[in-house]
Image (cartoon, grey):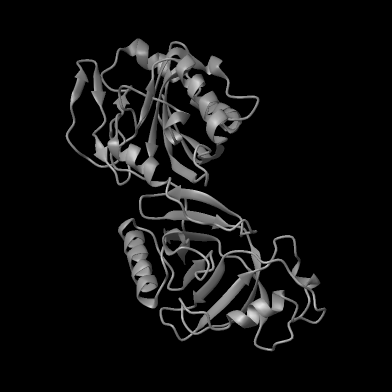
Amino acid sequence: MATAWISGGVLRPLAAASDAASSEKRSSLRVRFPCARRRNSSKVCAVRSDVGEPIQKREDSEKVDVDEFVRFLYDDLPHLFDDQGIDPSRYDDKVEFRDPITRHDSIQGYLFNINFLRLLFQPDFKLHGVKQTGPLEVTTRWTMRMNFALLPWKPELVFTGLSIMSINPETRKFSSHVDIWDSIQNNDYFSFEGLLDFFKQLRYYKTPELQTPRYEILKRTKDYEIRRYEPFLVVESKSDRLSGSGGFNDVTGYIFGKNTSSEKIPMTTPVFTQTRGDGLSDVSIQIVLPLDRELDRLPSPNVPSITIRKVDQGVLAVSKFSGKATDEIVAREEKELRAALLRDGLIPQKACLFARYNDPGRTWSFILRNEVLIQLEGFTLE
């Protein structure tokens, strides 16, 4: 189920740890790293292969070219769900896979789940990075987006996280693979928190079948998504408040033909309102223009208060909610998002965006899709 199926189960947790906690011996010849419980990850421990091990085993690990495994994963993992597929010859036959809700103890079980996911969900897998994190350990960061085709509204499921992969120095193949999701705390198998996270994403938000700005989901936690937006064009006018509609008739008038060439421009989604500081004295309302349009080839507005500009939002944190948005509700959602970002050590800018995807007069309140977006400073994926 869900991203978990990318890489089933490791029976023993393996991961690099950063915070000190109690150490325990695995055997007289193998010593664990201290365990750590990081936010949005389970308690995971890594087995040190360079302390207290037989000399021969240390020499074997030194002979493994871990950089070659890093290069291999960069080339191989992008084919996880395409016709080419991954190269199973680089995994031990009895390789152990584990994520919060799935586990397998063979390469055959892993490949079966990959094919099942591909058939049912048509996943879009994005590999963000691969790096060595131990003498015989490689960690990848990824995003996986899927459509749950069994439900009529085909909700999008998003999982982001890390895959921690250990190498068998004798076979020169991967011997274990454990997935850590960003959206849950308990990543041990079997995680009811992980199962709940899967089902929570089946909720229906109505998103019109209109063009919308393109973005890549870099990270998804239980409280928010972090997205990298591609640049887009907007027609913009001054508004009254973040949840208001002041100026809406002016910007819609432009796309309905009130421009110098009387051209009608297709409607898009969402409608943005934006504050440029920490107050409400400078608020604008924006409609996104079709993605194939160029700034110098658009007709000029007939109304002096309207401007057309290119927007390069960069990386934003996004919180989604439903219901009719009042000033109080939008302010509460913004406050909660800022608190979550500060708690997680991120740096939110003062400005805020509010996105409305639906006409509240024609859409049931409980399926309205609303979003609060805050731009982040200096964000990098871990």
| Residue that appears at 54% across and 31% down | 120
Residue 149 falls left or right of residue 298: left
Q: Is residue 182 visible?
A: no
Q: Nearer the viewer, residue 270 or 352?
A: 270
Q: Nearer the viewer, residue 115 or 297?
A: 115
Q: Is residue 54 above or below residue 80?
A: above
Residue 89, how many percent across, how many down? 55, 14
Number of on-image labels: 0
**Residue lying farthest right?**
261
| Residue that appears at 36% across and 67% down | 333
Q: Quadrant of residue 285?
A: bottom right
Q: Is residue 17 above or below residue 282?
A: above
Residue 309, how many percent across, how many down? 67, 74
Residue 54, how many percent across, how many down? 30, 12
Q: Quadrant of residue 347?
A: bottom left
Residue 260 falls left or right of residue 48: right
Residue 52 falls left or right of residue 320: left
| Residue that appears at 75% across and 64% down | 293
Q: Nearer the viewer, residue 179 or 287?
A: 287
Q: Is residue 112 above or below residue 364?
A: above
Q: Is residue 79 visible?
A: yes
Q: Which image quarter is the N terminus in?
A: top left
Residue 325, how many percent across, how many down? 42, 71
| Residue that appears at 68% across and 80% down | 253
